Amino acid sequence: MAQLLPQNFKNHARYVPLYHFVLFFMLVALLARATWAMIGHFSADTVSQFLLVAAVVLAAFFARSFALTAQDRVIRLEMKLRMQAVTPQLMPRFAEFTTGQLVALRYAGDVELQGLAQQVLDGKLTRGADIKKQVRDWQADRLRV
């Protein structure tokens, strides 16, 4: 099995080339073609073609959206359990974290989690990217959707 590179801020984003690039551009091309055909020759067939392509585009979008929402819920639960164990003193303020902040904090090791979480609650770190940039003990997540 190939050795995986250590994960960090610069390489943690996950791309599935056939989904993120090939399928995306295929759907854009199909939608543009169906739109052009409908505008150029308005008929029941071109409207049907446009609606079919639009439905496929929406299905692809929502499939990704629903999977990411489910993943975010799991990460939120994971972080709630982890913070109860590692930083119980911050638990009364857990509801103040946004999902994006918790997703970013997920990459922090236990030793630095409390400090980073406190900075988020103090308003010193707000954006997920800024939180991730502060992580020193990066906890890899290779099971993302």
Image: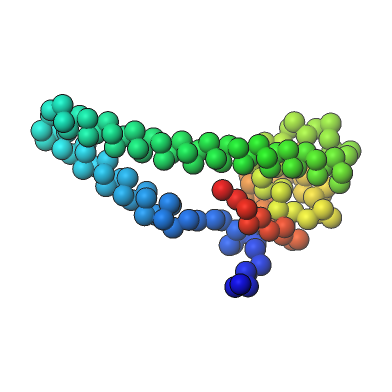
Q: Furthest-bottom residue in view?
A: 2
Q: Furthest-front residue in view?
A: 1
| 3, 123: nearer the viewer | 3
| 133, 95: nearer the viewer | 95
Q: Is residue 97 left or right of residue 58?
A: right
On the image, the x and y values in percent for residue 86 come to 86, 46
Image quadrant of residue 44?
A: top left
Colour mode of the rendering: rainbow
| 133, 79: nearer the viewer | 79
Q: Residue at x 70, y 45 (%)?
A: 125
On the image, the x and y values in percent for residue 107 come to 70, 53
| 18, 100: nearer the viewer | 18
Residue 118 in view here: no
Q: Residue at x 60, y 58 (%)?
A: 12
Q: Is residue 33 left or right of residue 53?
A: left
On the image, the x and y values in percent for residue 68 come to 56, 41
Q: Residue at x 37, y 50 (%)?
A: 23
Q: Furthest-left residue in view?
A: 41
On the image, the x and y values in percent for residue 64 come to 49, 41
Residue 13 in view here: yes
Q: Quadrant of the N terminus?
A: bottom right
Question: Considering only vertical position in the picture, is 53 above or below 131?
Answer: above
Image quadrant of residue 5?
A: bottom right
Q: Furthest-right residue in view?
A: 89
Question: Considering only vertical position in the picture, is 135 above or below 121?
Answer: below
Tell how many labels.
0
Q: Residue at x 63, y 44 (%)?
A: 127
